[in-house]
Image (cartoon, helix red, strand yellow):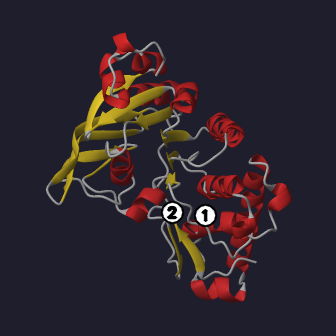
Amino acid sequence: MLDVHYTFSALDGTATLREYPSLPRVETKARTTQKQELLNLQDHPLLALDDITISFGGVTALSNVDLTVKSGEIRAIIGPNGAGKSSLVNVMCGLYRPDSGRVHINGHSFRQVPAQKAARLGIARTFQNLALFKGLTVLDNVTSGLAFARRSTFLGQAIGLGRARREENEARERAEQIIDFLHLGEVSGKLAGALPYGLQKRVELARALVPNPQILLLDEPMAGMTATEKQEMAGFVRAARENYGTTIILIEHDIGVVMGLSDRIAVLDYGRKIADGTPDEVRNDQAVIDAYLGIDREHDEGDL
């Protein structure tokens, strides 16, 4: 059984020993007709960044960046190293406070999204570097992704009172569903740290998916994987959207994966957005080719 002191901070990537406080429920929306819901989705993106600028030590990481993310889409952000991709994701989930601009999430507007509020608003993420509890089993790692949602008291969890026991059972049941979904059932009882790297990345994805987030931020989920592992991970990302309706924001250096997986792609270069569109539009954008590859199209016959 997962020790109730073990929790995972889903937004800053730290694996720590911590007593997690109870959090209030997210207020549910008033019921609307299906037509009204469709109109709202068209008029108001699920997530929007408005004129985001942020600097570190006098160096501008992001400059006047706008971005919209529609409900249910796979939205990629690409660009050369140092272009500002991870900084943009960190603004979305509240780790960074921009110098100027606003973050709009499902009708709520923030200068900086408080990290715990981001989780309650339905945002989860993975990281470039693994942050698993390597001494815990796969099942316990995945279950830890629901720690923030528990409403029973610490004492109740420690001694297994009724509500805490129900929450524990529900959490394990949900974790087992996600483990099966990601084909991790055979390693569910094994220590996460004993698994091959590709499976550890899949465990991290499972932990991010277990709270059923509305928005999932994936920061280089396929980094360091073999071609086969990348293909499998891309399939799971697509299936998460199709099966759970998850809106996915993806940072990934493998352009082939990005082009085959994404609905829309934004391109950053030196902290500025230089292109935004469908994979075909981005692939044929001369500014993207020049910035991302550092070459002139007329001297290269390859595809982006």
Query: Where is residue 104 shown, x and y percent of the image?
Result: 32, 44
Query: Where is residue 65 shown, x and y percent of the image?
Result: 25, 38
Q: Is residue 44 visible?
A: no
Farthest top residue in view: 298
Q: What residue is drawn where x is 37% and y is 50%?
A: 92
Farthest left residue in view: 58
* First in sequence: mark 1 vs mark 2: 2
Farthest right residue in view: 186
Q: Is residue 9 visible?
A: yes
Horizontally, is 167 left or right of 58 in the view?
right
Q: Are marks 1 and 2 in contact (CB under 8 Å)?
A: yes
Q: Which residue is mark 2?
A: 10
Q: Secondary structure at mark 1?
A: helix
Q: Which residue is mark 1?
A: 145
Crowd band around label 2 with a 10 angstrom C-alpha radius: few (<14), some (14–19), many (20+): many
Query: On screen, 57 above or below 43?
Result: below
Q: What residue is drawn where x is 56% and y is 65%?
A: 131
Q: What residue is drawn where x is 63% and y is 68%?
A: 144
Crowd band around label 1 with a 10 angstrom C-alpha radius: few (<14), some (14–19), many (20+): many
Question: Where is the N terminus found, in terms of image quarters?
Answer: bottom right
- Depth check: give the residue in front, 68 or 199: 199
Q: What residue is drawn where x is 34% and y is 23%?
A: 295
Q: Amino acid at mark 1?
A: Gly
Q: Amino acid at mark 2?
A: Ala
Query: On screen, 194 above or below 179?
Result: below
- Depth check: give the residue in front, 43 or 216: 216
